[in-house]
């Protein structure tokens, strides 16, 4: 079974500069408004249905939350559904 990729917060900031990725911020909307990675979409509910609504399954995805727990859970679901997904490990606040 295919696994999702895992990167550090620093690597995620570099990846977010690449416009071929769909970047998803799973933190609260208030946190998103304070700061977020370049081009990130706010999806605080972090569910697969919201991902499907973006209709970009053919793209690479980068997802992050505050500490990595939520992004790992969603990445596991996304990979099973055929997405090419990378999740951020650790505290994203170190680069925001």
Image: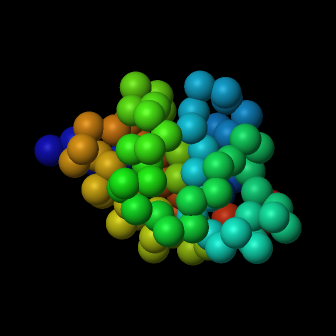
43 or 18, nearer to the observer: 43
Residue 9 drawn above or below residue 58: below
Residue 48 drawn above or below residue 46: above
17 or 31, nearer to the observer: 31
Task: Please give the name of the residue rendered at 47% of the width and 64% of the height, measured from the top-left corner.
Answer: 46
Task: Please give the name of the residue rendered at 57% of the width and 33% of the height, measured from the top-left corner.
Answer: 21
Q: Is residue 29 left or right of residue 34?
A: left
Query: In the rendered image, which quarter is residue 52 located in?
Result: top left
Relative image position of residue 2 (x, y in whole percent) = 22, 42
Residue 9 drawn above or below residue 34: above
Task: Please give the name of the residue rendered at 46% of the width and 31% of the height, measured from the top-left corner.
Answer: 56
Quarter occupied by the C terminus: bottom right
Quarter occupied by the N terminus: top left
Relative image position of residue 71 (x, y in whole percent) = 47, 63
Residue reaching furthest right? 34
Is residue 14 visible to the viewer in this orientation of the structure?
no
Relative image position of residue 57 (x, y in whole percent) = 39, 32
Residue reaching furthest front? 53
Q: How is the image coloured?
A: rainbow
Task: Please give the name of the residue rendered at 60% of the width and 44% of the height, measured from the top-left corner.
Answer: 23
Is residue 10 visible to the viewer in this orientation of the structure?
yes
Q: Is residue 60 left or right of residue 28?
A: left
Relative image position of residue 30 (x, y in whole percent) = 76, 73
Q: Is residue 25 left or right of residue 52?
A: right
**Disc count in the image?**
0
Query: In the rendered image, which quarter is residue 85 located in?
Result: top left
């Amino acid at each position: 079974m295919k696994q999702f990729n895992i990167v550090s917060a620093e690597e995620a900031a570099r990846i977010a500069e690449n416009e071929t990725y769909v970047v998803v911020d799973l933190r609260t909307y208030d946190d998103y408004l304070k700061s977020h990675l370049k081009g990130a979409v706010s999806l605080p509910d972090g569910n697969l249905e919201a991902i499907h609504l973006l209709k970009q399954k053919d793209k690479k995805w980068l997802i992050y939350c505050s500490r990595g727990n939520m992004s790992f859970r969603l990445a596991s679901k996304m990979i099973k559904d055929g997405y090419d997904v990378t999740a951020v490990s650790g505290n994203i606040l170190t680069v925001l």
